[in-house]
Amino acid sequence: MQITLSHFDVSILFALFSSIILGLVTKRTDRERLHYGLYCFGCFLLALFGIGWFMRLLHG
């Protein structure tokens, strides 16, 4: 069985796993970890879409 992922899918997975790791290693309580992980995930998504739209405008 072979799984084929698009660039967008891989970017979302990277954002998800990076956010989980950042939340786990930087905060002390579970509540802080959850909030920081969600915040990081949101920032990753914002950057992903922002850079995507910027590239779209540059290349037409």
Image (tube, rainbow, N blue to C red):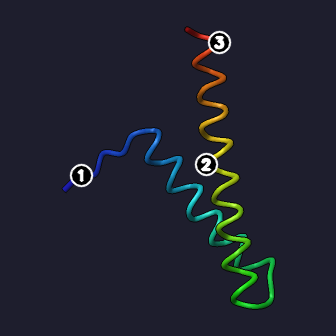
Q: Which tag is nearer the camera, tag 1 or tag 2?
A: 2
Vertically, is 57 above or below 8? above
Q: Which residue is mark 3?
A: 58
Label pair 1/3, CB-CB below 8 angstroms = no
Q: Residue furthest bottom?
A: 29
Determine which of the numbered discs, if any, sits on residue 2 in the image. Answer: 1
SS assignment at label 1: loop
**Residue 42 appears in which quarter of the rendering?**
bottom right
Q: Would you name the residue on which mark 2 appears? A: 45
Percent x, y for residue 27?
80, 82
In the picture, which quadrant includes the N terminus?
bottom left
The residue sitting at the top extreme is 60
User: How far is the residue under mark 1 from the one under mark 2?
Assistant: 27 Å
Picture coordinates of residue 53, whole percent (x, y) = 60, 26
The quarter of the rendered structure image containing the C terminus is top right
- Residue that appears at 57% across and 65% down: 17
* Image x and y of residue 21, in percent: 66, 72
Q: Is residue 3 left or right of residue 6?
A: left
At mark 3, the secondary structure is: helix
Nearest to the observer: residue 43 or residue 19: 43
